[in-house]
Amino acid sequence: MNVRGRIVKFAATLFAIAVLSNSALFADTEIWHYWLSGGEKDAINALMDVVKQENPGMTFNAREIPGASTEMRRQLGSAILAGNPPEVYHAGLGLDLKSYVDAGHLRTLDDVWAKLNGDKIFNPGLQKIVKVNGHVYAIPMNTHVVTHIFYNKKIFDKLGLKPPKNAEEFLKVSAVLKKNKIEPLAAAAKAGGTIYHIYPIFIDVLGTDGYMALGNGSLSWKDPKVRKAFEEYRKTFVSQYMFGWSGYGWAEAANEMMKGNVAMYMNGDWVVSYFENAGWKSGVDFDFFPAPGTQNTIVVQVDGLASPKESKDEKGAKALLLSAAGTAGQAAFNRYKGSVAANLTVKPDIYKGVMKATYDRIQAISKSGTMLPNLAVMLPPPLWSELKTQVETFALKSDDATLDKALNALETIRLEQLEKKAFANWSGMN
Amino acid sequence: MKLSDERRLTFALFLFVPVVCFFVFIVYPIFRSLTLSFQEWDGLSQNIEFVGWANYKKIFSSELLWVSLTNNLKWLVFSLLAPTMLGFFLALLVDQKVKGESLFQVFFFIPYAITPVAVASVWSWLYSPRGGVINQLLTSIGLPQFRQVWIGNPDIATYSVMLASLWWSTGFAMVLYFSGLRGIPPELLEAADVDGASFWVKLRKIVFPQLLPSTIVVMAMQGISAMRVFDLIYAMTGGGPGISTHVLATMMFDVSFNRFEMGAGSAIAVVLLVISSAIILPYVFHSSKGLEELRS
């Protein structure tokens, strides 16, 4: 072959590689998600079955992104820059969603919302965190409660303990457990496993307005009340933590409660599907009570789905989102996910045991209580990340010097973020 | 066209791809990190603002940087000493012409073939505070007072991760030393035997000097790993508890992808690059010198 021929062949090979690497050739409508563990995986599989059934002739592909929201943001950012993001992705809501919207990377879903009659079928609180500047940018999939404490029912029954209703009762129950050589509270360090434990204390000490003020950036972390909240956290929760809690991940910590080494565990209600998958019976082996200070309040974590503007198949994206937001899609998803469907038209008979009780509580709180968003969706990422670190550090070494250092660090970042106008003016969820 | 020109063109074409890859995937990202370290960007927004030295000021005033830097130095000292010495010791053992020699080689080298995330998973399980093998073993031999929260105690967590790393990386040092030992001319050792030299004298006067090239390679590779250590820490502790096990690489990831401060993350990358270069350049010079000597 002459030189010219070689050059042509070389160029043709390069072109072929470039073309083949362009995923437009693979015409599946893709969703990226990080629902990877037992029940979560079943949930996304069930959802995709509904999506496929409702959209015959279209092809859908669900791709797992291990590494949760951090890895999702990293990979999605690269894919957006490369002009090749998925049609739909598992989205963080609130401020995280707003950051994508502000950067001009999200497609509005106003038409999907209108078709669904979204203003009617979704909880008004949830609607606030999927809308930016009056436009819809995400579909809420569920409601997870992060202020419930799960307990080993057999241990409680054996010792004649009743679920505590306030901090004082909680401490009394913990004392009885300790006396019976059972550690009161499981906790985990990895991935900010202690952060939710301070929420009920914030609500109790600062009130719901104070909690929202932390999220809005209008309350100083050096405010004496915030300091008091940390001190209460030390007294109520940290002193009850099990041996070696800082060496556990959330699932391992849940195992300790299942083994009967620990009586209570506070984490998001995604642990319900973990317990059930491990063979525990909801309402028989375990149950829950609202964390002290949250009798009339819940803090919720919501999973959402959004669609990057740069993705190629807008029609496929919207078809997928319509199915995911619909009654059948949400019922299929939440039956396995261990969460309550965001869509209010889903019949409650899909929930059993603890999840039915959670559903009932959410309904009651929607009518006569306060539903608060997770601080994760309200705080600017540097402050949220620092808060997780400082709460964990304080739980490890709960002296006043550590507390001073923690509050100073948080306040420094709050002021920095205020200067950057990074906070949003959140109102409550109901 | 002459044949030599044609061959030159062929070589140029073959070189084209790696050179382009080198510039696109190595040179450009370094340049971009450098420029980004003087800018503020959240990784998504179209607004990228020039902020001068602000990112450097910010990271150098952060406690996290000094904890990370200290941990990197601990990792450096540990990596230069522990796997090197243990690898040398194992290579000496395997070199004793024992039966099943290759089996021992494979046995010691296998951990290095395992992906670090799997290593992290296994060691996290071994370190589990209550059901973990290590604490259970301590309890069963009557030493429960020595049970530890291995990766949950900020005072010892970094050393616990280092132990996992030692198990993982020693095989690599052993293989390099073993090939070095097999490369020592037997006449030297035989002559020493004839002169009645003891084991220690042979080790000091013959083996160590002959293994100098292997030692340089092992130490350089371990030094490089110490500066870029990330996966084991990220998978075992995520930099925690608190910030106790962070190194510069995990800090860079945390700042860039948890806090979305790409500029500050890039500034950390630049600091890491400068420190790593200072450690790695002597090895590069040494290797280049060796190459020049071979050519001449």
Image: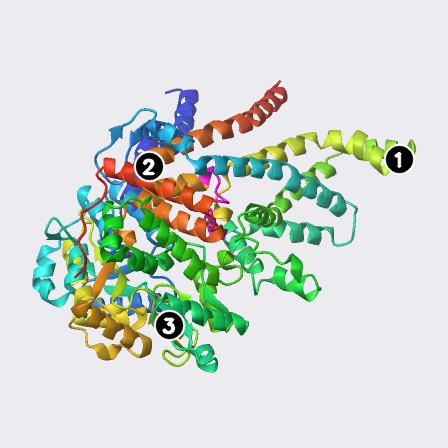
What residue did someone put label 2 on? B262
Question: Can you say whether A177 is above or below A306 in the image?
Answer: below
Q: Nearer the viewer, residue A59 or B149?
A: B149
Same chain for the residues under marks 3 and 1 in the image? no
Identify the mark nearer the N-term, 1 or 2. 1
How far from the left and from the top, in percent, is residue A399?
A: 48, 49
User: Between marks 1 and 2, how big is the CA–CA gap?
Assistant: 62 Å
In the picture provided, is A192 more to the left or to the right than B151? Answer: left
Colour scheme of the rendered structure: rainbow
State which mark lies toward you, 3 or 1. Answer: 3
Which type of secondary structure does the marked residue at label 2 adopt? helix
For label 1, the SS is helix
Judging by the rendered image, the residue that carries numbered circle 3 is A164
Seen in the picture, residue A179 relative to A233 is either above or below; the reply is: below
Subunit ID for the residue under disc 1: B
Q: Is residue A6 magenta?
A: no
- Residue marked by disc 1: B193
Quadrant occupied by the N terminus of chain A: top left
Note whether residue A104 is visible.
Answer: no
Taking the image as shown, residue B233 lies to the left or right of residue B268, namely: right
Picture quarter containing residue A7?
Answer: top left
Identified at 51% across, 51% down, the residue is: B115
Image marks 1 and 2: residues in contact by CB distance under 8 Å: no
Magenta range is B235-249
Q: Is residue B245 magenta?
A: yes
Cβ atoms at labels 3 and 1 below 8 Å apart: no
Q: Amino acid at mark 2?
A: Met
